[in-house]
Amino acid sequence: MDTGGIGLYKAELTPKVVAAAVEEQVDFALAAASLVLLIVDASEGCAPLDMEVAAKLRQAGKDVVVVANKADTEERDRQVGEFYALGFGDPFLVSAEHGRGMAELCALIIKKLGPAPVEPTTSTPHPIRLALAGRPNVGKSSLGNRLLGSSRLIVSEIAGTTRDPVRSRLARAKSDGSKTEFVLVDTAGRRTANKRDTLDFFSQVRSNEILADTDVVFLVLDAQQGVTRIDKQLAGELALIGCGLVVVVNKWDLAKEAFRADAISGFEDEEEFRAKFRAAVRRELFFLPDPPICFVSAKTGLRADDLLDAAEGSISVRARRFRRAASTV
């Protein structure tokens, strides 16, 4: 599990709200982890912030290995002695850029944790692979957290905080005693197609690879903005990929509040408002094969449980279409 950097609140360019979310995510990771790799910078030596992080890790009582990255020169090798002050024994020298020490580090991890357990072969279906996709700041991570009931994903009001896809498992028990398992992936938000921000560009490339290996994608829209040009572009790409698709209109609680406050007129009641909003979404995304549309609120939890039902329904619809297509060949 890779976490956001601890202590990012010290950086001038990191908004405090993101820093707080990162710290919360780190606490979650520490509670779940069996082994912690404390990554330090061999080019800078032991910094005061490293000492703060070490103190936090000691409080957690976890097994910790200090990994000195960027150990690319003999001079930097000599500097790593500073990291003994962290109190976790011999620092492990690596260079992620040049591959130095990576195989040895993997061997050390296996030695400490043991080999991965071999899962018994059963007839249990594979988990349904889900992905959250959409523009930045439409609430993908908040929806993921609502489904997971945890803070595994970083949530903030600032666009672009989910740089890398995050995988999480969840399961849901049914009334008949059976259980459906899911794997949920939150992808980086889709921006306009330019490559000026290299980190954003490669995040999008990784997101595209994830989406191509997904059973069902939740295409998240913002109820306050409707279907935008970028939403249409992403929907078109998802249609070409051929995965199952559920359109999710998030922040519906805000739309309902606006309707009740008479900020939206021309509708007799909320049902008519939602029906016409649904029809407008279908008109804008006319090229999609009639996907289900869910009106939810990640903030309040409004109808969030409908998402997993819609995902399972989408899988069933795709299976029927494949069977019909195969029968005509």
Image (cartoon, rainbow, N blue to C red):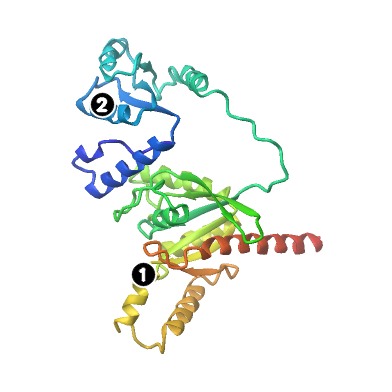
Query: Looking at numbered disc 1 in the image, what kind of residue is underneath it?
Result: Gln
Spot occupied by residue 51 in the image (x, y as percentages of width and height): 24, 25
**Mark 2 burial class by Cα count in 10 Å: few <14, some 14-19, many 20+:** many
| Rendered residue at 38%/35% (across/down) | 30
Q: Is residue 31 left or right of residue 320?
A: left
Between residue 142 and residue 191, name the one nearer to us. 142
Secondary structure type for disc 2: helix
Instruction: Say whether disc 1 or disc 2 marks the residue closer to the N-terminus.
Output: 2
Residue 39: quadrant of the picture: top left
Residue 261: quadrant of the picture: bottom left
Between residue 91 and residue 113, name the one nearer to us. 113
Name the image quarter holding the C terminus.
bottom right
Spot occupied by residue 54 in the image (x, y as percentages of width and height): 28, 26
Q: Which residue is mark 1?
A: 225
Q: Do tag 1 and tag 2 residues touch (Cβ < 8 Å)? A: no
Spot occupied by residue 263 in the image (x, y as percentages of width and height): 29, 81
Query: Looking at numbered disc 2 in the image, what kind of residue is underneath it?
Result: Asp
Q: Is residue 125 above or below residue 268?
A: above
| Rendered residue at 29%/53% (across/down) | 158
Q: Is residue 209 above or below residue 103?
A: below
Q: Which residue is mark 2?
A: 50
| Rendered residue at 71%/63% (across/down) | 321
Secondary structure type for disc 1: loop
**Mark 1 burial class by Cα count in 10 Å: few <14, some 14-19, many 20+:** few
- Disc 1 to disc 2, C-alpha distance: 43 Å
| Rendered residue at 30%/30% (across/down) | 59
Residue 202: quadrant of the picture: top left
Foreground tag (1 vs 2): 2
Q: Is residue 297 above or below residue 123?
A: below
Between residue 277 and residue 272, name the one nearer to us. 272
